[in-house]
Image (spheres, grey):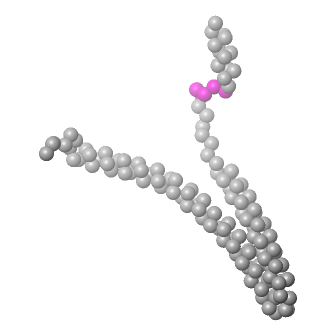
Amino acid sequence: MPEPVDPPAESLGRLEARIDAFEARRGRAGPALNQGAADGYRMLGQMLSGVLGGLGLGWFFDREVGTAPLGLLTGLITGAGLAIFAAIRTALRLSARSASTAFEPPRSETLRESPRADREELEEDD
């Protein structure tokens, strides 16, 4: 059996460092991904509850008053309309929140403002 190149202590140390780096990266990306999924499920819940709530109220109205399909259809249309309104409102709120927390990397002084500045600098050198 061949001898290992690295002593076990060094190998374990490098492995632990790689695991720590991986967990640190995963920890930073995790909450943002989970928040996006939570927001999506919230919007899905709003849409379903609006449509099903409208259907339920329309069915109840039909049963009590006796207007067979009219209450059900009115409830469906009203519930769907309110669900779409609530989803758009939530999407606008989420968009504003993500725009306010957007990451903007710092500008480096070594970056040029435009390719034109590079050309002008080259012409000055000639």
Most distant residue in the top direction: 126
Quick one: quadrant of the C terminus?
A: top right
Image position, residue 47 (x, y; %): 71, 70
Q: Compare residues 120 and 109 and report the one nearer the observer.
A: 120
- Horizontal side, residue 86 vs residue 102: left or right: right
Most distant residue in the left direction: 1
Q: Is 36 one of the magenta-colored residues?
A: no
Quick one: quadrant of the N terminus?
A: top left
At 83% from the left edge and 78% from the top edge, which residue is drawn?
A: 74
Q: Is 111 one of the magenta-colored residues?
A: yes
Image quarter of residue 119: top right
Above-or-below relation of 80 to 97: below
At 75% from the left edge and 63% from the top edge, which residue is drawn?
A: 89
Above-or-below relation of 62 to 73: below
Image quarter of residue 120: top right
Image position, residue 36 (x, y; %): 60, 59
Bounds of the magenta segment: 109-113
Q: Compare residues 6 and 74 and report the one nearer the observer.
A: 74
- Horizontal side, residue 59 vs residue 110: left or right: right
Above-or-below relation of 73 to 23: below
Image position, residue 105 (x, y; %): 60, 40
Most distant residue in the front direction: 69
At 42% from the left edge and 53% from the top edge, which residue is drawn?
A: 23
> For the stretch drawn in magenta, what is the main secondary structure?
loop
Above-or-below relation of 68 to 39: below
Image position, residue 61 (x, y; %): 81, 87
